[in-house]
Image: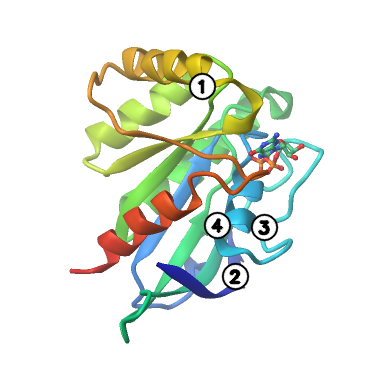
Amino acid sequence: VLITQGRYVASAVKKEQYPETERPEIVFIGRSNVGKSSLINSLTRVRNLARVSAQPGKTQTINFYEVGLKWREEERRKIFYLVDLPGYGYARTGKEQRKIWAKFIEEYLLTSPRLLFVCQLIDIRHEPMASDCDMFQWLVEHHIPVLVVATKADKIGKNARQKNIAQIRRRFGVPDLSVLPYSSLKNEGRSDLLDVIGDSLIE
Ligand code: GDP
């Protein structure tokens, strides 16, 4: 599967600002600084499509990107919306702000009519934090399909990788959970993730 286009469409903090579209949506979510912007840029190969930030917790809007896919050696093409949600679990904003955030993420996730699945990003180097586990449980409880993507895979060796993926499965309580390692630096995992996205778009 190849990406044919990626462009920014809109940002929203409430429902009225969501773009009007019939396109299916694939959502990216994770703690601040997990590498979400880097992954979106790596996946789409559009430089600076998502803003990579040295300052965690800055993006506080839901960002919509229109992304085109084409199947190799086929006529088939699809367009989907890639939806970038604000990072969760960022302490510096304080309790009140965090609550507003969560509500605003929840409202989107519970009302989006064409949400195909959520990519939940976890930093492969660290044990999932309570906020990661809470988010995962919440998605499962609300019957939203989740793909766990383990980011920054280039930062650790192969053995540690397997060990940490097993730890994610354990912490999330799903022994056979599929966890896709990804490195935005090396574009590793990119074609696997594109295949998953492509498959989800074929009804
Ligand atoms: P976001 O806050 O989740 O959008 O995270 P960013 O994409 O802004 O990345 C946070 C930091 O992690 C930046 O310094 C990135 O350069 C770094 N980073 C992100 N992805 C990778 C990766 O795959 N490998 C490495 N080595 N660093 C990464």
Residue tagged by mark 4? 43
Point out the tag, 4 or 2, that comes first from the N-terminus.
2
Q: Is residue 63 above or below residue 178?
A: below
Relative depth, front residue between 69 and 114: 69
Q: Is mark 1 within 8 Å of ligand 1?
A: no
Q: Quadrant of the C terminus?
A: bottom left
Residue displayed at 49% across by 22% down = 131
Point out the tag, 4 or 3, that comes first from the N-terminus.
4
Label 1 close to label 4 by CB (< 8 Å): no
The quarter of the displayed image where residue 58 is located: top right
Residue displayed at 38% across by 47% down = 118
- Measured in 3D between alpha carbons, the distance from the residue under mark 4 to the one under mark 2, in whole angstroms, is 19 Å
Q: Secondary structure at mark 1?
A: helix
Label 1 amino acid? Lys
Point out the tag, 3 or 1, that comes first from the N-terminus.
3
Q: Secondary structure at mark 3?
A: loop
- Measured in 3D between alpha carbons, the distance from the residue under mark 3 to the one under mark 2, in whole angstroms, is 12 Å
The quarter of the displayed image where residue 74 is located: bottom left
Q: Specify the label residue 50 is tagged with.
A: 3
Residue tagged by mark 2? 10
Q: Is residue 95 above or below residue 2?
A: above
Q: Is mark 3 within 8 Å of ligand 1?
A: yes
Using residue 90 as the reference point, say whether residue 168 is left or right of it: left
Residue tagged by mark 1? 158
